Image: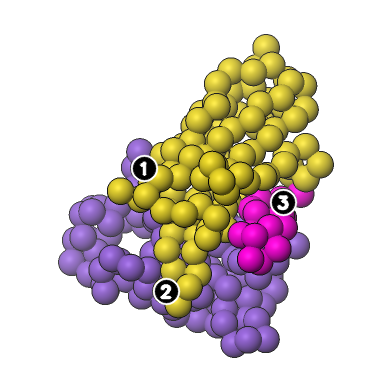
Amino acid sequence: DIVVTQSPLSLSVTPGEPASISCRSNQSLLHSNGYNYLDWYLQKPGQSPQLLIYLGSNRASGVPDRFSGSGSGTDFTLKISRVDVEDVGVYYCMQATQTRAFGQGTKVEIK
Amino acid sequence: EVQLVESGGGLEQPGRSLRLSCTASGFTLGDYAMTWVRQAPGKGLEWIGFIRSKPYGGTTEYAASVKGRFTISRDDSKNIAYLQMNSLKSEDTAVYYCNGRLVRGDIKDVWGKGTTVIVST
């Protein structure tokens, strides 16, 4: 089974500062078609998850450009260039190469 | 408005069954792969399974934790996806979300607000 592990599990960020979350997989998520099957989601308090990034680095429609995804194979990163107060919540990566599996989640709070 | 609405949650005893529905409005559910995800109280997201759209075979995949007990199906004529949950256990207590994804060039990704299932005597 493919397991994805996020770090850190919690993050306290000053508004306007950058933030970064790591997602590591125990197997490569790089498909033979060249795509990395790794999504990033944000679950804001009291809400359903929302898709931020798909295929490792593609921003979903309506997602601010301060969010970016990078990485390939087994190591991926979600970066927020300048954290906004509305970015508070729990961020999850999810591998979609072999069935699906979420990481444990990273809780982002504002200092 | 594009939306998904889950229904059918509630309190059920261990060993019993429950069927959740996920009703789409504002779009054609038949074009979308439909996924169920759950979240136990105070815990993270757990992927349960999905069903592909008919053009992609309409096949299903499940997490090991529910395989053999849970079944996902769809009735595209009614714009509804289902999650049949049998042999319920206390650890199935969670908020259950349905998600629809369409990959056609760009991605369309829609989530419901969830329905709560409590398994307890």
The answer to which of A48 and A11 lies nearer the viewer is: A48
Q: Is residue B5 above or below residue B58?
A: above
Q: Which residue is mark 3?
A: B62
| Residue A49 x %, y % | 42, 50
> Within 10 Å of the Cα at label 3, are there few (<14), some (14-19), or many (20+) other Cα atoms?
many
Residue at the spot 67% in from the left edge and 44% down from the top edge: B72
Q: Is residue B51 above or below residue B44?
A: below
Q: Nearer the viewer, mark 3 or mark 1?
A: 3
Q: Is residue A3 left or right of residue A51?
A: right
Q: Magenta residues, as a range?
A: B49-64
* Label 3 element class: strand
Tell me the amino acid under the disc marked 2: Asp
Find out whether residue B20 is within the magenta segment: no
Q: Quadrant of residue B19?
A: top right
Residue A35 in sight here: yes
How many numbered marks does the figure carry? Answer: 3
Q: Which residue is mark 2?
A: B106
For the C terminus of chain B, the quadrant is top right
Tell me the amino acid under the disc marked 1: Gln
Q: Nearer the viewer, mark 1 or mark 2?
A: 2
Distance in Å between CA atoms under marks 1 and 2: 24 Å
Same chain for labels 3 and 1? Say yes or no.
no
* Label 2 element class: strand
Q: Which residue is mark 1?
A: A47
Q: Is residue B68 left or right of residue A5?
A: right
